[in-house]
Amino acid sequence: MSAITVTESAQAYLADLLAKQNTPGIGIRIFITQPGTQYAETCIAYCKPGEQKAEDTPLALASFTAWIDALSEPFLDEAVVDYATDRMGGQLTIKAPNAKVPMIRDDSPINERINYYLQTEINPGLASHGGEVSLVDVDDGVAILRFGGGCQGCGQADYTLKEGIEKTLLTRIPELKGVRDVTDHSNRENAYY
């Protein structure tokens, strides 16, 4: 478990906010969007019972539970959630010094490195089209990918795969030989055009 500190003043402030939600068992969820990149943003959201993800780590606080997003957890190490009051009222602050630090190394397994670049560089761009791409497998140095969301059935998927995704991954992971798409693009239900 990463070391996240939620100060007493932040717990009191959040407990007060949660009490106003009139939802028994409501907690918070702490996560980072685009962790390990310069675009990383640390976020806190309400988390009703059952809204947490199975892989989240529960952090039991005095009067509620904070659910820590599994993908974000290493980037939340040494994070501090605080509530400070001043003349203007108060403000909740989150300091996460490791949010933007890449957590992979050159000797990390190839699938971890591929997933890292998919999450941090490729999917944020595809998200604007409601799409995403995920790693299925690595076969003899070739990344087997599956498009989802608005990318499935999109006429530009081949171009995106070769010109965008493959070029990015081959630049970042030199030992990778190429990428292959296993998506059935005949299903055009959610395709983005």
Image (cartoon, rainbow, N blue to C red):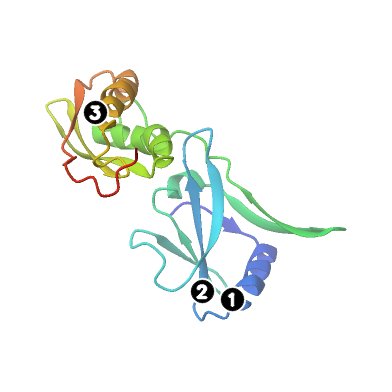
The residue at 23%/45% (across/down) is: 188
Q: Give the spatial CA distance, label 3 vs label 1.
A: 46 Å
Q: Give the spatial CA distance, label 2 vs label 3.
A: 44 Å
* Disc 3 secondary structure class: helix
The one nearer the camera, 137 or 123, is 123
Q: Which mark is residue 106?
A: none
Quadrant assignment, res 85: bottom right
From the viewer's perspective, tell me whether residue 17 is left or right of residue 131.
Answer: right
* Disc 1 secondary structure class: loop
Q: Which mark is residue 158?
A: 3
The one nearer the camera, 142 or 146, is 146
Residue with the mark numbered 2: 26
Residue with the mark numbered 1: 21
Which amino acid is tagged 3?
Asp
> Is residue 86 in view from this perspective?
yes
Where residue 83 appears, x then y in whole percent?
Answer: 71, 59
Q: Could you tell me which quadrant the N terminus lies in? A: bottom left
Which amino acid is tagged 1?
Gln
Which amino acid is tagged 2?
Ile
The residue at 16%/42% (across/down) is: 186
- Upstream in sequence: badge 2 or badge 3: 2
Where residue 61 appears, x then y in whole percent?
Answer: 54, 69
From the viewer's perspective, tell me whether residue 152 is left or right of residue 100.
Answer: left
The reply to whether discs 3 and 1 touch (Cβ–Cβ < 8 Å) is no
The reply to whether discs 2 and 3 touch (Cβ–Cβ < 8 Å) is no
